[in-house]
Image (cartoon, rainbow, N blue to C red):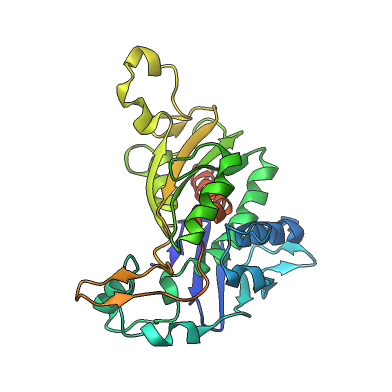
Amino acid sequence: MNTFGNIFRFTDFGESHGAAIGGVIDGCPAGLTIDFLAIQHDLDRRAGRDSQFSVSERAKHEADKVEFLSGIYDGITLGTPIAFIIWNTDAKPEDYEAISDIYRPGHADFTYQAKYGIRDPRGGGRASARETAARVVAGSIAKQILSKKGIGINAIVTQVGNETEPENFPTLLSDIKQKGDSIGGIVSCTVSGLPIGIGEPVFDKLHARLAYAIMSINACKGFEYGSGFDGIDKCGSQLNSYSGGALGGISDGTDFCFRCVFKPTPSISQEQHLPDGSQLTIHGRHDVCVALRAPVIVEAMTALTLVDLICLNDR
């Protein structure tokens, strides 16, 4: 499926090194004044051009300027489908010509080929994190809807590898980069102002829907909310007063807090050994740590989930 949501629905399209990526938002209410600068700010956050570690060389040069094609007139939503496009202005498919017939370790090359009988070898095609730029546009609009309701979403990187002190991140990342390697990280997110009653019993619990959304992000390998795995050594007497923002899968009016973990970037310049005994070195423009660019994507998927659940709640 390439569509997310039930009432507030988002469909995206495009491949990493194709002509463009983009999307269609259906179910957006009419009369919302769009803050285009906020959308561009979120796209710039995803690019992370202010950091020497958080971005690939492609992100440094790709403008990521969104062009809206429908659904908005004079800066105000019409209630009709909002279509948008982001042109791939710095695509370099030639970077992948030498390895077009190789299944890269840690990538979706093999599974896409096995499932469809064909794949786009240029940067992974649909499996590339390039696709998340479209999510950021849709999520930024969703955040603007939530903001009108007093709901805020804030995600930050709280751990890189085993390091939890942000001031030490640059030293660790510099060392990893010099080795031609990559490393994973953890993003923590807090939703504030969420009213009581969001989330459905049993199968559409608030945390279940959020886990589904967050785990759909490229390279995300785990999700926890509230005390999560850290609470395994605690007793009920210590944790019963802390819900993490939901009880029975329904928001309880307190801040909803969750964490998610991102694996190391599988594309690295360090030599790797393939199952057939051959060796592979991947050249191109890749992140040292994808988690550093993930917070705004986490916010986007959280916002899309919450707007959809609120629409469901208001029916």
Tell me if 101 is positioned left or right of 268 in this view. Answer: left
Work out whether residue 281 can be spotted: yes
Q: Is residue 70 above or below residue 215?
A: below
Q: Position of residue 86 (x, y in %)?
A: 62, 74
Q: Judge left or right: residue 53 versus residue 210.
A: right
Residue 122 figure quarter: bottom left
Q: Above or below — where is 179 with respect to 187?
A: below
* Residue at horizontal 69 percent and vertical 64 percent from the top: 78
What is the x, y in percent for residue 66?
67, 70
How far from the left and from the top, in percent, is residue 305? 50, 49
Using the image as rendered, state which of residue 207 and residue 259 is in the foreground: 259
Query: In the picture provided, is 36 more to the left or to the right than 179?
Result: right
Relative depth, front residue between 91 and 228:
91
The percent position of residue 79, horizontal first and vertical second, equals 65, 62
Q: Residue furthest right?
A: 74
Residue 288 appears in view: no
Q: Residue, x 48% and y 66% (percent of image)? A: 129
Query: Who's the residue at 57% across and 44% down the image?
Result: 155
Q: How many marks?
A: 0
Above-or-below relation of 44 to 156: below
**Left or right: 23, with 210 as reference point:** right
Q: Please identify the quadrant where the N terminus is shown.
A: bottom left
| Residue drawn at the location 66% of the way across and 61% of the way down | 49
Give the residue at the far left of this rendering. 276
